[in-house]
Image (cartoon, helix red, strand yellow):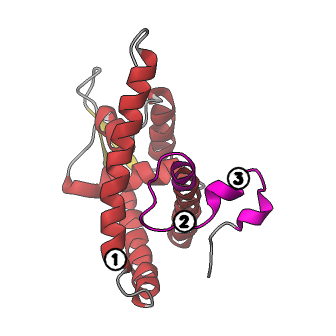
Amino acid sequence: MDNKVDPSIFPGLAPDLAVKPADEALPGGGLHRLEMAVQRAGEGLTRWQAGCFEQVSSVPLTGAEITLLLLIGSGGRAKTIKEMARCTNRVDIPNIQYSLRKLASAGLTSKQGAGRSGVTYSLTAEGERVSQEMHGVRERLLLQALAGQPGLAGRLDSAAEALEELAELYGAAMRAAETPGET
């Protein structure tokens, strides 16, 4: 399925969204095209996670809540809110706390400890079951999809590295914008 945006439907953006030669520099129109692709990929990921989650649980969760659930279950240890915020590049701690309360109310996570920095979150037995089943569904479907795309796995690894660098650049640019008198 071709999921690329047809530039003709966005006349004002057409030059930015048009396919460009690989050797053309990104700044300007190319950067906007990249940002739109990242936005579309993020929305696609959210729908993808929700679809996979619906196959293993009837609990109504948002994409952000599913991401937190999977994050808590990764790495084999409990996570702090600060770790989750850093891993997801989020600064909206009250919204993360709301999502964690929702996950706990659904019986998927539990909270341990007390105080500002001593609180961690881990999966309950039900949360672990749902998380494992979801990983199984995702892996089965993604491996099927990747089988028809030779070379894509390597390109995705490179893309992940580039996106991590881009996230750092956004952070640096934001800090520069927030610092009065410095550019």
Q: Which residues are magenta?
A: 6-34
**Identity of the residue drawn at 23% across and 27% down:** 118
* Residue matched to label 3: 13
Circles 1, 3 touching at the beta carbon (< 8 Å): no
C-alpha separation, residue under disc 1 versus residue under disc 2? 23 Å
* Residue matched to label 1: 153
In the picture, which quadrant includes the C terminus?
top left
Badge 2 or badge 3: first in the primary sequence: 3
In the image, 107 versus 45, the foreground residue is 45
* Residue matched to label 2: 20
**Identity of the residue drawn at 43% across and 69% down:** 134
In the picture, which quadrant includes the N terminus?
bottom right
Residue 8 in the image: state x and y as whole percent. 77, 65
In the image, 113 versus 183, the foreground residue is 183
Residue 70 in the image: state x and y as whole percent. 38, 56
Badge 1 or badge 3: first in the primary sequence: 3
Residue 84 shows in this picture? no
Can residue 40 be found in the magenta stretch? no
Circles 1, 2 touching at the beta carbon (< 8 Å): no
Specify whether 17 is left or right of 171.
right
Above or below for 107 versus 125? above
Which element carries disc 1, helix, strand or loop? helix
Q: What residue type is disc 1 on?
A: Ala
